[in-house]
Amino acid sequence: MGFFNKLFNREKKEKLDAGLQKTKEGVWGKISRAIAGKSKIDDDVLDSLEESFITSDVGVDTTLKIIDRIRDRVARDKYVNMNELNQLLGEEIAAMLVRPEENSEVQEDFTIKKKGVHYVIMVVGVNGVGKTTTIGKLAAQFKKAGNKVVLGAADTFRAAAIEQLDIWGERVGVPVIKQKMGSDPAAVAFDTVKSAVAQEADVVIIDTAGRLHNKVGLMNELTKIKNVMKRVIPEAPQEVLLVLDGSTGQNAFEQAKQFVAATEVNALAITKLDGTAKGGVVIGISDQFKIPVRYIGIGEGVEDLQVFNPEDFVATLFSLE
């Protein structure tokens, strides 16, 4: 079993390295240029680091926190040379990233600790961030890991959303509970969890509409969906997953702010990191909202959606072993 775990981790790490290449070049490339020719970590180096992180979409508040941590470490350790800087950055940033609770049901290989607990994931996010695609990839990964999965098409605002989820269901081979466009989203969610219980499903994933023009309306809709699911599964939803497009940089911060205000988000999925140098947004959003990043999307393939591992992420960014 140990060999297969190592094989899985190696393959996952290779995909992560490839998927984060642009971000690595953007973040660490800027830092390398900023400190080129320097012999020690002084105020000039720290100023250059600050600029590098801010322009890499880490965010101002988180950047200042990182710089303070580095300044404290340098003062405490008395002497830190430039060769040790990336190790130091990696350690401090890894410590800042919020981790899922230790009792989380979802493992890194998408297995569920307790079979048949009907683990319900309610997925939220604006249209265009890859929300439905993320749901499809999650369904594929959970099924591959041996879980029985049911999907619910509760984004009834757009016919295209229902159709897209239906296509994913057929492709992956999992049932999709749906009604016609314009139906009550809460009714779809209710039917989905009832069906999941009847089928003894392990994982239930509910798609929701991504409208932000009326925050009060969105809040009411999502609250209603959660309440009707609790009638069938009292613990549901165990995960309210906000999907964000990593390539949008600071716009992702604003979306996170809106959805965190509208509902009780407790997990993040950050998509499209393979096509952007703005992956530093992962660090800033996790730190600012104190919500764990659960999944990251680093490519088009189903298996390019990974359960997020903070240590692997930081090791890739800073070329750490």
Image (cartoon, rainbow, N blue to C red):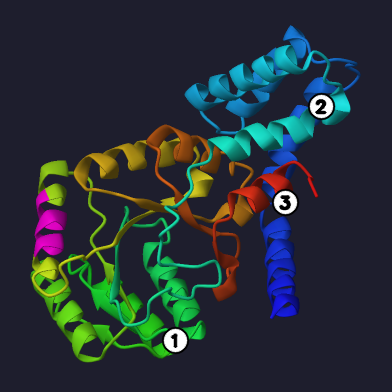
Task: Give the crowd class for mark 3: few <14, some 14-19, many >=20 residues within 10 Å.
Answer: many
Element marked by disc 3: helix
Task: Give the crowd class for mark 2: few <14, some 14-19, many >=20 residues within 10 Å.
Answer: few
Quarter of the picture containing the N terminus is bottom right
Residue 301 appears in the rendering: no
CB contact under 8 Å: marks 1 and 3: no
Element marked by disc 2: helix
* 26 and 286: which is toward the camera: 286
> Which residues fall within the magenta stretch?
220-227
Amino acid of disc 2: Arg
Q: Which residue is mark 1?
A: 172
Q: Residue at x 44, y 72 (%)?
A: 138
* 189 and 292: which is toward the camera: 292
Q: Quadrant of residue 157?
A: bottom left
Q: Residue at x 53, y 43 (%)?
A: 282
Q: Which residue is mark 3?
A: 21
Q: Which residue is mark 2?
A: 33
Q: Residue at x 67, y 58 (%)?
A: 19
